[in-house]
Image: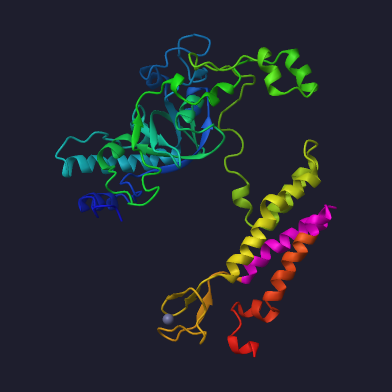
Amino acid sequence: MNKHRVPEPIEKGVLRAKYGLTIYKDGTIRFDATNAPLTAFKPKEIGTPVEVLRKLGYDIDVEGKPLVNEDQLLYLQPQDVILPIEMGDALVKIANFIDDELRLIYNAEPFYNARNREDLIGHLVLGISPHTLGAIVGRIIGYTDSQVVFAHPFWHQAKRRDCDGDGDSIILLLDALLNFSKHYVPDSAGGLMDTPLIIMPILKPDEIDDQVYNMEDVDKYSLEVYSLAWQDAKPKELEGCIKLVKSDNPNIAWTHNTTSIVDGVKKNVYSTIGSIDKKLKLQLEITSCLNGINEREFAENLLNSHLLKDISGNIRTFFTQRFRCKKCGKKFRRLPLSSRCTSCGGELSPTVYASSVKKYLMLGKKVLKLFPLDPYFSSNIELLEKELSMLITKEDAKLLTQKRLNQYF
Ligand SMILES: [Zn+2]
């Protein structure tokens, strides 16, 4: 689909298949992970021996003492990254593929010679955020048993992220240098999006977005901060009494120590609960325990910003849906008069089911039952329900198909 219909050399695909690797539209292989900001770490937390870290430039700990044991706390350098173990193992496969490629396609010496993820420590990767065209170089210094990419806030900001848990991609540097081509990407609007068109080799703290400098750089809060907070002061009014991060000092202070950066929850429970019903139930339970949250406001927000829009959107999708032939797969923008496939006579099935439309309606009603909300919400739901019931009879919902024209006569 690219402009000149250029494929990459097919040999590259064969070599990738050897390692079970698949590629992105731009010819690179990438792994997605969530951002996590980090400013200091202990060698034992990232599984990297102190001798290796000393070679990478970590000579002293946060107190200025020479690095000798794995329990010392070190300031993370702004371009160093700590990857998930799983990603490290996957990068080894890519490194092996690249070495094959160098040997067999480019007649060059293998570069990585990696047998395990530890062999990739000190090597460079690219970090790239969705909907951008620029990638920043990072250096692997270790791995954790987590699902996140730990890096300095400056590094996340250089990818144009504000360190709030967004998902980004990691690419092995040589993969981008050898296999990326802007000639591969689709010739359509946004085709170049999410590709490393520009690579930033050196992170310059005074060239990244100022947002990162709205972070505090203190080891404790003064009494003044607490009193101002008590008086509901605006953040701006606290400016004078909290030291903020400056571009010339990446060593950011912290208020509380941790036993380990990867202790605690490794996977968001939201991704393991399953049913949306249960998610909602648990979410409402938590809200009822928290003083800081007004339950009623929460329920109204939920209806306003999600459920009501979802329900009306789903109703619209249901009535403008396409139909698909169960036999040959042919798609129809409108149901043919015969209600059968015009090519093979096969049975047609809807692409959107009434049950999926009803699901959110039921959820909305459930929320309404739990809280005495403004009548605006209940009448809104009522209207949507009416709209739906006028258009789908019980039988229709069962059959999941539209009425036949002759049924109207
Ligand atoms: Zn058919």
Q: Residue 162 lies in what quarter of the image? A: top right
- Residue situated in front as seen by the camera: 257 or 370: 370
Q: Residue furthest right?
A: 372
Q: Choose between 118 and 289: the one closer to the eye.
A: 289
Residue name at image x 32 percent, y 49 percent:
185
Color encoding of the figure: rainbow
- Name the residue: 61% across, 80% down: 399
Report the side of 388 relative to 350 (left or right): right
Q: Residue at 40% across / 44% down in the picture?
A: 193
Residue at left 58%, top 66%?
317
**Which image quarter holds the C terminus?**
bottom right
Q: Quadrant of ligand 1?
A: bottom left
Relative vertical location of residue 323 with respect to residue 313 in this rendering, above or below: below
Front residue of this view, candidates 260 and 244: 244
The quarter of the rendered structure image containing the N terminus is bottom left
In the image, residue 62 sits, relative to residue 355, either above or below, namely: above
Residue 301 magenta: no
Quadrant of residue 401 within the rendered picture: bottom right
- Image position, residue 139 (x, y; %): 38, 27
Query: Is residue 141 positioned above or below 95 on the image?
Result: above
Q: Residue furthest left?
A: 107
How many callouts does the rendering have? 0
- Position of 389 compared to 26: left or right? right
Task: Estimate the x, y position of residue 220 in percent, counting from the top left.
Answer: 67, 15
Dominant secondary-structure state across the stretch colored magenta: helix
Image coordinates of residue 67 in percent, x first then y, are 45, 13
Q: Which residues are magenta?
A: 354-378
Question: 103 or 352, which lies in front?
Answer: 352
Across and down, in percent, residue 314 comes to 62, 63
